[in-house]
Image: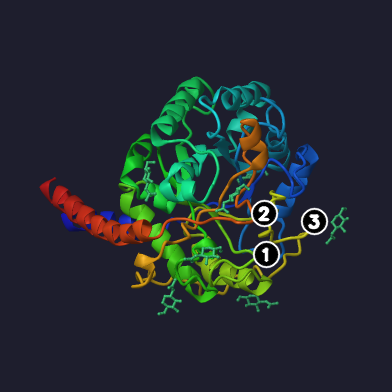
Amino acid sequence: MRVSAALSIAVTLGSTAAQDTILGFNSGASDDKGNAKNQQDFEREFKAAKSLNGAPGEFNTIRLYSNIQWNTPSTPIAAFPAAIATNTSLLLGIWASGTDNIDNELNALTAALDEHGSKLADLVVGISVGSEDLYRVSEPGLRNNAGVGNNADTIVRFIKDAKSRLANTALKDKPFTHVDTWTAWVNGSNKAVIDEIDFLAVNAFPFYESERDNQISNAGSLLNSALTATEGVAGGKDVWITETGWAYTGPAFGAADATVDNAGEYWQEVGCKLFGKRNVFWYTLRDANPDNEVKFAITDNLSTTPRYNLTCPADSEELPTPAPISSNSTTSTGNGTGSSNETNSDSTASGSASGSASPSATGAAQGTGAGSLTSVSMVNSMAMALSVIFALAAWAL
Ligand SMILES: *[C@@H]1O[C@H](CO)[C@@H](O)[C@H](O)[C@H]1NC(C)=O
Ligand SMILES: *[C@@H]1O[C@H](CO)[C@@H](O)[C@H](O)[C@H]1NC(C)=O
Ligand SMILES: *[C@@H]1O[C@H](CO)[C@@H](O)[C@H](O)[C@H]1NC(C)=O
Ligand SMILES: *[C@@H]1O[C@H](CO)[C@@H](O)[C@H](O)[C@H]1NC(C)=O
Ligand SMILES: *[C@@H]1O[C@H](CO)[C@@H](O)[C@H](O)[C@H]1NC(C)=O
Ligand SMILES: *[C@@H]1O[C@H](CO)[C@@H](O)[C@H](O)[C@H]1NC(C)=O
Ligand SMILES: *[C@@H]1O[C@H](CO)[C@@H](O)[C@H](O)[C@H]1NC(C)=O
C-alpha cells in the first residue's frame, strides 16, 4: 500500500490519464477583422465547434479571455447567453494586464450572474485570472516586445480579489487557475501564483519554438517537454493545456512551416494523443487577431467541414519522449517559449481589459533560449527529487 501510494504520486507527476476530459477551443472577443462578436456570432461558433465532421469527440467547452464585451468598459460578453443557448461549457477568463485592478471584469461577471444565475454558473468549468501576463513581463517577453503584462504579486492579488468577490455567488466552488507559458511556470519567481491556484494552465506552441529544431516531426516531443517541465513544478496539481495548435498559413518560424498538411499532422500526431487523456483547448476554431499573419483556424467561415482530417487514428497512444536538449541551443540567443505574443493592440493601447485570442502579431512569439532550456533539465531532476520525497512521505505514513 505504501509502495502503491508512492507510485501513484510518481505517475501523477509524469503524466495524467483521466478519462472524462475536456475537448475545447479558445474564443477571442473579436473576429479576425477586429469586430466585436455578438451573441449570434458566438452561437454559430459554439455550434460549429460541436459539429465538426470527423472530430474525435464533442468540442463542447470554450475558453474565453475576458468577461467583457469587446470595446465596452464592463458590459458582460455576449458569449454568456450564447453558451446558455447552446449548452456550451466555459473556462472563464479574466483579462489581467494593462490594469491595476480587475473590477470591470468582476463587475461584468457578477452582472451576468445576476442575470443568468445557475444557468450560467452550471456551465463554468473553471476561472482563469490572467493569460500569459507573467511571460510578457519576463526577460524574453520584454526583449520580444510581447506587450503589457503583470507580475506574480499582482496576479496573486487579482486571484484573491476574484475569489473574494465570487465567494458568495454561484461560482464560489469553481476551481481557479492562471494561464501562462511553460517558461513562466518553471520560473521560481512565479511560484506564489502556483500556490494560489487549483490547477495550472499552459499555452504551448512548438510552432513558435524557433530556437529549437521545431520542424513538424519534432513537434510532439517539444510539446511533451513543455508539459513535463510544467508538471515538474505543479506540486501534483493538474495541468490543463489551454492553447496548442499549428499554423496552416503565414510565415515560417525557425524550422516550422505553416501549411495545411503540417497543421493536420499536428492534430493527428499530437492532438490525437492528448484528446481524451488531458483537458485541451485547441488553438483554434476561428482566428481572432487581424494583426497576426499566422493563421490557425481549422474551418473557414465556421463551416463544419474542417481544413484537414480530424479523425484520430485508432491507435493514438503517448507523445514521443521529451526533446533532448541539443548542444547548440543552450548557447543560442533563443526564440521560442512556445508563447504566442498575445499582444492585442486594442486592449493594450486603451488599457481596457479585453483579451483577444493569441497568438497575435506578425513578428510573433519569441522566447527564452538558454534559460528555459536549462530549466527543462532542472525541472526534470526536480520532478524526480519530488517523487522521491513523496515516496518517503508516503512511507512515513
Ligand atoms: C448539456 O451538455 C452536457 C455535457 O456538457 C450534457 O451532459 C447535458 O445533458 C446537456 N444538456 C442538455 C439539456 O442537452
Ligand atoms: C523570471 O521571472 C522574473 C520575474 O518576473 C523575470 O524578471 C525573469 O526575467 C524571468 N526569467 C526568465 C528566464 O524568464
Ligand atoms: C528567431 O525568430 C526569428 C523570426 O522567426 C528568426 O528570424 C530568427 O532566425 C530566430 N532566431 C533564432 C536564433 O532561432
Ligand atoms: C466567408 O463569408 C464571407 C461573408 O459571408 C464571404 O464574403 C466569404 O467569401 C466567405 N469565405 C469562404 C471561404 O467561404
Ligand atoms: C483520416 O485520418 C484517419 C486516422 O489517421 C484515417 O483512418 C482516415 O482514413 C483519414 N481519412 C481520410 C479521408 O483521409
Ligand atoms: C543546431 O545544430 C544543428 C545540427 O548540428 C544545425 O542544423 C542547426 O542549424 C543548429 N541551430 C542553431 C540555431 O545553431
Ligand atoms: C508582439 O506584438 C507586438 C504588437 O503587435 C509587436 O509590436 C511586437 O513586435 C511583437 N513581438 C515580436 C517578438 O514580434
State if disc 1 and disc 2 touch (CB < 8 Å).
yes
- Residue 377, picture quadrant: bottom left
Figure check: 181 above or below 322: above
The quadrant of the picture occupied by the N terminus is bottom left
Work out whether mark 2 precedes mark 1 in sequence or the reverse, and give the earlier one: 1
Amino acid at circle 1: Gly
What is the image's colouring?
Answer: rainbow
Which residue: 74% across, 53% down? Answer: 48
**Residue 15 shows in this picture:** no
Which dot marks residue 250? Answer: 1
User: x%, y% of residue 308?
Assistant: 69, 70
Residue tagged 3: 301
Amino acid at circle 3: Asn
User: x%, y% of residue 164?
Assistant: 45, 22
Query: Which SS class for mark 3?
Result: loop
Residue tagged 2: 292
